[in-house]
Image: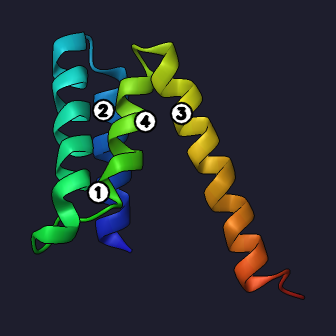
Amino acid sequence: MEIKQNIDRMIAYLKTHPSPPVRISAGIVLVVAGIIGPFLPILGIWMVPLGLVLLAVDFPFAHRLSHALTCFLHNAKKRLFGKREA
């Protein structure tokens, strides 16, 4: 749980960072690393949405793309796992 909190804090910091070049650089690095991630250890496809979230702060096309990806993943999760009863 602590790792997730650290990642959430890092994303929140980068999304509000006053320097767009820092956000843009971090977003591009995450997207590229996520694309080549299946061929390297530790890196993975999970980095692509994270990079898109950072790029979405500065670029409208990345915002639309990250929203579409989030909706797709949410719907896929519903289809795969169905509704859970309380």
Q: CA distance from mark 4 to mark 2?
A: 12 Å
Residue contact at pointers 2 and 1, CB within 8 angstroms: no
Classify mark 2: helix, strand or loop: helix
Q: Which dot marks residue 65? A: 3
Q: Amino acid at mark 2?
A: Tyr
Classify mark 3: helix, strand or loop: helix
Q: CA distance from mark 4 to mark 3?
A: 9 Å
Q: Which residue is mark 4?
A: 53
Quadrant where the image shows the C terminus: bottom right
Q: Residues within 10 Å of mark 3 (few under 14, many from 20)?
A: some
On the image, the x and y values in percent for residue 7 come to 31, 54
Q: Amino acid at mark 3?
A: Leu
Q: Which residue is mark 2?
A: 13
Q: Residues within 10 Å of mark 1 (few under 14, many from 20)?
A: few
Along the polypeptide, which appears first: circle 4 or circle 3? 4
Residue 79 visible in rendering = yes
